[in-house]
Amino acid sequence: MPFQLPYECLNEILKNLKVEKDLRSCSLVNHFWCEVSIRILWRNIHNYNLLIGCFSDESKEILRKNDIIISTSTSKPLFFDYIKFIKNLSVHDTVCGVLKFLKDQQPDDDNKKFVVTQEIFKMLMGQVTLKKLEFCSRRFLIPNIPITTYPGAKDCLKNLSEFDCSSNIDSEIFYQMSQICHNIESLSITLEDIISNGLAELISVQKNLKCLNILHESSDVMYVPPLIANINDTVIKLRLEGRYLIPLSFISKLINLQELLLSFRFEGFEDMEYMTLPNLQILKFYYNVLIPKPLIIFFENSGKNLRVLDLHNTNDNSLNLAVAKFCSNLRSLRTVILDVESTTLKVILQGCQKLESIYLLCGSNYLNESILLEIIVNDSPRNFHELKMDYVGGFEHIFFQTALAPVFRRWENRTPKNTLSLFIIGICGKSIRRASSIVIKKFQKSGYKSLYIGTLELSAEPENLVYWNPSS
């Protein structure tokens, strides 16, 4: 009898597939694989024609009275109870799916759009138990749908663990969710010009909130402090971003915070001077810090437990020296060091003896590649194994062909023998790949076993880097 993976194992493997086409291919292997794949595909609504075909006779009659046609092909017997598999619901995606369904039936008819969308939510509220709900009304032109009033809504939403919303949805929805949902672990809020009553209450009743994301798109900051005043100290991950500043003073009460990500343009970090976050391990900035003094004081108070620090493209030598002095337990660092400040890199490597990875700019006025590599080989800590070189200007592959050999010969003789992963970063991905491939082949032929060279391409999100494996 052929060996068959247990359901839990196969489910764990397949749910990590990122490409929908791969999951569909897996569904063709056999019935067992098909069932596991379909369950994963239908965590989100996968086919709106099929979904609408599952409407009750009452809902179908409502559609008929509104001159909405359901294809007869959707009435065929189904292999699975697809609706039961749905765990994630996006109001925006649902409206888009309805528009596609109505594309030949006057899709611009707001009444038809509302009727179909309403019947979908009525059906789902009565049959599924959601884990994730996205309700961002700013993304489409349709009246707020009172999903919390439909039969079964309490059971559908009571185990909700992830909620993504805009601040301007109907207040009644927030109030009713405050009565139902007390165990949301991840909450993402887009702050619009309108803050509906009830949002603050929904935030305050969450007793198990772990992750909070706030996107600030309104120019009015006066209403922000009352809104976030009652956030529980259970939050361990906080991300603040937007075009306008959010007052940071409230963060000081989040004593269990482990990860803080800040994405504002250039200013607004003065409050950090007065914070002490004893459990903070990850701190990332997605814009430059122009006033370093508050951050230096913050490092003095809370830098000891930092494991990951990303200063984006902030260029300040005093800040780098503070990192070396106060952040001795860092494993990963991104910063900027000018060519004339190369000794600062040595100070950082000596002060951060647990450092394993560093991201630095090269070229132009920044660190010279030769000096950088020399310092890394001679002064990096025992467990250091990853260097990311982000090129400002062109990538000089001739340099790599002529200058790397002696540097990495010494790396081969280091103790312990860690493989050094050298990543070349730039927006000219193809040219970098071609150039680095030449270097890679040369070093492979020379027998270097403690060296890996690859490239990284910058993506739209500043924290995401797309890896390319030159050996594949």
Image (cartoon, rainbow, N blue to C red):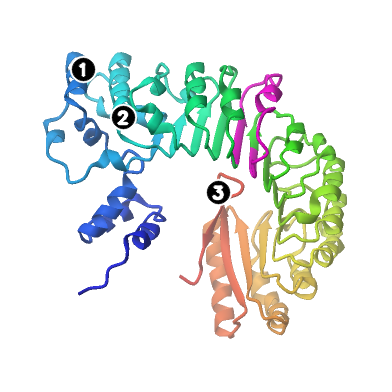
| Residue 248 at x, y percent in the picture | 74, 33
The three-letter amino acid code for the residue at tag 2 is: Gly
In the displayed structure, would residue 256 be above or below residue 140?
A: below
Q: Is residue 231 in the magenta section? A: yes
Q: Which residue is mark 2?
A: 126
The three-letter amino acid code for the residue at tag 3 is: Ser
Which of the two labelled residues, at mark 1 and mark 2, occupies the earlier sequence position? 1
Which of the two labelled residues, at mark 2 and mark 3, occupies the earlier sequence position? 2
Q: Residue at x 40, y 28 (%)?
A: 154
Report how far apart the C-alphas of labels 1 and 2 lie in the structure: 17 Å
Please, what secondary structure does the residue beneath circle 2 have? helix
Q: Which residue is mark 3?
A: 459
In the displayed structure, would residue 274 be above or below residue 170?
A: below
Report how far apart the C-alphas of labels 2 and 3 lie in the structure: 41 Å
| Residue 236 at x, y percent in the picture | 64, 45
Start-end of magenta stretch: 211-239
Quick check: marks 1 and 3 in contact, CB under 8 Å?
A: no
Q: Quadrant of residue 111?
A: top left
| Residue 49 at x, y percent in the picture | 22, 33
Q: Which residue is mark 1?
A: 62
- Specify the quadrant that holds the C terminus: bottom left
| Residue 62 at x, y percent in the picture | 21, 17
